[in-house]
Image (cartoon, coloured by chain):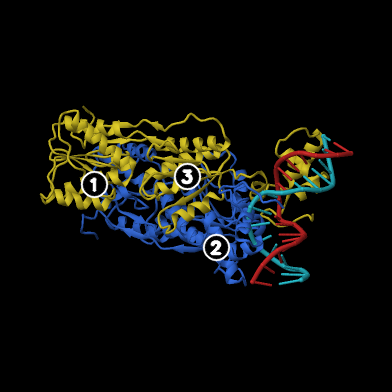
Chain colours: A yellow, B blue, C red, D cyan
Amino acid sequence: MATGAAHSNGTTIYSVAERAGVSIASVSRVLQGSTAVSDKTRQRVLAAAEELKYVPLAAARSLAVRHHEAHGLVLPELSGPYYSELLMGFESRAADLGQSVVLMLAQGKDDLPGAVRKLATRVDGLAMLGSSAIPESTVTALHGSKPVVLIAGDPRTDVDTVTSENTHSAEEITSHVLGHGRSTVRFLGDPDSGPDVRDRYAGFVAAHESLGREPLEPVRIALRESDGTTLADRILSGDLQTDAVVCANDELALAVMKRLREGGTRVPDDVAVVGWDDVMTARYVEPALTTVRQPVRELGALAAERLHRRVTGIAVEDGPQVIPTQLVIRSSCGCRPDAPH
Amino acid sequence: MATGAAHSNGTTIYSVAERAGVSIASVSRVLQGSTAVSDKTRQRVLAAAEELKYVPLAAARSLAVRHHEAHGLVLPELSGPYYSELLMGFESRAADLGQSVVLMLAQGKDDLPGAVRKLATRVDGLAMLGSSAIPESTVTALHGSKPVVLIAGDPRTDVDTVTSENTHSAEEITSHVLGHGRSTVRFLGDPDSGPDVRDRYAGFVAAHESLGREPLEPVRIALRESDGTTLADRILSGDLQTDAVVCANDELALAVMKRLREGGTRVPDDVAVVGWDDVMTARYVEPALTTVRQPVRELGALAAERLHRRVTGIAVEDGPQVIPTQLVIRSSCGCRPDAPH
DNA sequence: CTGTTAGCGCTTTCAC
DNA sequence: GTGAAAGCGCTAACAG
């Protein structure tokens, strides 16, 4: 075989071997930290590799070893701090484990299943977010051929899942609002948009029931600023009656609160507002937003680790992994600043 | 050669060929949309591929064609909306161009140059952000072996660069503040932290000079919330005198403004505050933040496209590419709400 | 139009 | 301990 040129650096295992005066097998051995190699050979190879700044071509290595040392991650999109944090956690842990991460955003792909299958072709496994943007069928189809871990999706028995706690925290924050003496508290968000919103609504319902109260139907709107504004207008116009809203995320809560105040409604006096996520803005607004903080970065890290264990075949305790969240009491719920509860 | 099993789907080009009753060459041909293939063969192959859900193994293909159909992107980190937007734009355009994106975050890598070299091994080219977190030497080293495009870095002649406009906008926003009759306006941010901050300061200086005023030295602090708070304390204590601050980003501006108000200083009456980026929070705070909006997503898309052109050898108009920004006047500069200028 | 075959760069037996 | 050689799955000449 010829001493192939080409490739990024231009240097191949052949160049290194030649330079070191050994066979490519030896080069491969020392670079893989493999078995017995004489110290002399090792030195020569190391030196040559260093001088040539040799880095094995990933594709060639992948083909030979039949894995990619890369994790796939598919997220709906990237707006807001949630996905970014998740991604940071994921990338960080993946990198620690020596895995590259190839990222794919579902948004704007017209053939998501196809794109995912193509993605699967260059990674050892993939993590994907459970949401309406990423149909469960997509993960089901993959599972069996490649390890998959579902993030913030439905706990399933057939696929690894990592989630942050939803139901209990939702019950807690709802109870807190109810505890402020509110009578008509509404849940803002569509339980069908994804497992997390669904579970938060479940907690909302539970809080009511444990007090013997009748929970209201959810107000099914998307978790975007614009939807919050529109909704606030409905409250202002008297179209929707309420004295407290439990929002499925902060973006929504913030938008509602802002518009409500612009319209002359007092928050929390007239209507209390609470959110979910604890985004940066939450503590900047007046009144500061009561919300639930999720350890999102950790969630991402966990997903990467879990995936890696599956890929490498390390035994993994089965079952869904759920990590706890934290209620953050500020003022928008009716508590006074710096004097919660 | 045996009919290899293995791989994600388990199906290889051999399985497809066998199933279709043709040679692997024919399979490859129709799948590459290559030259003359009989309609009959095409149908059979297509059918077989479909039934087997065959997707070529990326590594094998890469090795054969000697490119990866993937773009690398290295970012410092991912907090705040800036990088996320950039990434979304990049991913979106890259996907449109049929490129996967493998992402690397500089943060936390102790051997960044090494990591980048390894990354370079699995992509056709990479885009990286110009910042102090990613030394220019890193890109210089790569350039020559792989196409590189620098985002928001120093316009260089040896490397492709895409940037959003800084100096002129900075001059504009500073002039605006000066126009409000402020006498001691300060620039918050470290010009040495990166090309963008440096250019913004240059605009700050220019604004002063064109009015025959003496610009103050920059207050060199990092663009983080905590640094803003600390700085606001210095103003409150009288340690630092000023009646207007031009901040190098919104996060900083927001933090300063918040602390100032907590300390009883009126914004904008006592001190005006303006920022840069137009993050979500900017329009939620009271007073709403005057700032500069950057088309960040577009910047990312541009980077992906430029990179792709380089990779594929399409002729590219040389020279730095800079896209315009937009001054967003709200109230924190001294303008009254809904009655700018 | 189609099949055979020679690599792409790397890992890994298998002999020596 | 070390080299020769056989693949990994795919593409691209090269003959028919």
**Going from the N terminus, do you reach mark 1 or mark 2 first?**
2
Q: Which residue type does callout 3 highlight?
A: Glu
Residue at figure coordinates x 13%, y 45% from the top left? A265
Neighbour class for label 2 at 10 Å: few (<14), some, many (≥20)? some
Q: Whole-Å distance between the Cαs marked 3 and 2?
A: 43 Å
Residue B68 higher or lower than A220, as above or below = below
Residue A207 appears at what percent x and percent y? 21, 31
Residue at figure coordinates x 30%, y 41% from the top left? A197
Q: Whole-Å distance between the Cαs marked 1 and 2?
A: 61 Å
Residue A296 appears at what percent x and percent y? 40, 38
Neighbour class for label 3 at 10 Å: few (<14), some, many (≥20)? many
Do pointers 3 and 2 mark residues of a single chain?
yes
Chain identifier of the residue bearing label 2 in the image: B
Q: Quadrant of residue A49?
A: top right
Mark in the foreground, 3 or 2: 2
Residue B264 higher or lower than B16, as above or below = above
Q: Quadrant of residue B29?
A: bottom right
Q: What numbered label is drawn on residue B77?
A: 3
In the rendered image, is residue A99 in sight?
yes
Left or right: residue A38 compared with residue A157: right
- Give the secondary structure at mark 3: loop
Q: Residue furthest left?
A: A238
**Circles 1, 2 touching at the beta carbon (< 8 Å):** no
Residue at figure coordinates x 16%, y 31% from the top left? A180
